[in-house]
Amino acid sequence: MPRHSRSHRLLLWAAATDATFERRGDRLVGQCIHCQRRLSVDLDPAPQVATVEHIEPRTHGGTDAVENLAVACARCNQGKGKRLDHRKRSDPTLSRVIDTLRARRAERLRTAPEDWPLPPLPRS
């Protein structure tokens, strides 16, 4: 099995546990948690257009638990980070975005299909 970076393993697990994603050959195809744009995640460690989104930012104590991970397009993920991640956790706008993303993630959450070859999740 190829060597996967920590971020690629998190991305694969976020996609595998997201009901909008389905396996198509050597990739997983689904939707961005923010804009619903169609995204593709390669199973092999290669440069990706999709990014792993930490719903509750790591800067505010968010973990790598699958419930806190989502797949986002780079544009949406970077935009959220620049606009919100630097704010205090008590900021109402940040809290509202986290709550919205948690609800979306909960709606999409599923058990990873057993037939998808996933590298082990990194320890938090």
Image: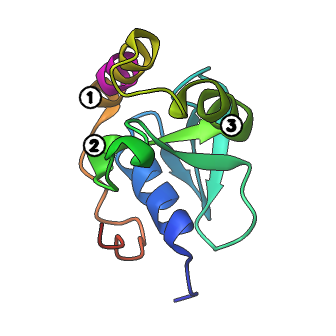
Q: Which residue is mark 3?
A: 78
Which one is earlier in the sequence, the residue at label 1 or at label 3? 3
Prevalent SS, magenta region: helix
Image quarter for residue 35? Answer: top right
Mark 1: amino acid:
Ala
Mark 3: amino acid:
Gln
Task: Determine the secondary structure under disc 1.
Answer: helix
Q: Residue at x 26, y 41 (%)?
A: 110
The residue stretch that appears in magenta: 99-104
In the rendered image of this protein, does residue 55 appear above or below residue 43? above
CA gap, disc 1 and disc 2: 7 Å
Mark 2: amino acid:
Glu
The mark found on residue 83 in the picture is: none
Residue 42 spot, x, y in % from top left: 64, 61
Q: Residue at x 56, y 76 (%)?
A: 5
The mark found on residue 67 in the picture is: 2
